[in-house]
Image: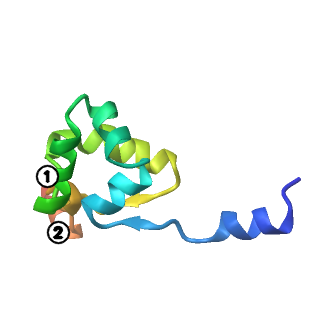
Amino acid sequence: MPSPDQATNAAAPRPVITTPRDAVDALGGGRCVASMCKVTESAVSNWCSEGWIPPWWYAALSEALITRGYRVDPQVFRQRQLTTENQARTNG
């Protein structure tokens, strides 16, 4: 049975990752992300400086963030959020 603190934490909204720096920090820092992606720490640093992570990393990194309890703004990876109108067009 969870303690009252755990029950309270479970109901708390999940933090939203809105910048590459947030994502890198949440995943353990530049060295950890570089290792996960098999790129250099310099590449990860560049992502933070440029303000976006290349879209091809969306699946792997967003999954890792979601697993850690975060929500991810797709703009971090230059992905568009589907609006209701766009979803209707996409679904037929």
Amino acid tagged 2: Glu
What residue sits 14% from the left and 57% below the top?
Answer: 78
From this view, report whether residue 85 is shown above or below residue 52: below
* 37 w.r.t. 64: above or below: above
Q: How busy is the neighbourhood of tag 1: few (under 14 within 10 Å), some, or many (20 plus)?
A: some
Question: Which label is found at residue 46?
Answer: 1
Name the element at disc 2. Answer: helix
Please tell me whether residue 48 is drawn above or below residue 9 in the rendered image.
above
Q: From the viewer's side, name the closer residue of 10 and 34.
A: 34
**Pointer 1 or 2: first along the chain:** 1
Check contact, mark 1 vs mark 2: CB within 8 A: no
Question: Which residue is pictured at 20% across the width and 35% down the height?
Answer: 40
Q: Amino acid at mark 1?
A: Asn
- Residue, far top: 38
Pick the residue in front: 64 or 13: 64
Q: How many marks?
A: 2
Q: How is the image coloured?
A: rainbow
Seen at 40% across and 67% down, the residue is: 16
Q: Position of residue 37 (x, y in %)?
A: 27, 33
Q: Residues within 10 Å of mark 2 (few under 14, many from 20)?
A: few
Work out how far the residue at label 1 is from the one at label 2, CA to CA, in angstroms: 34 Å
Q: Which mark is residue 75?
A: none
Please tell me the numbered disc located at residue 85: 2
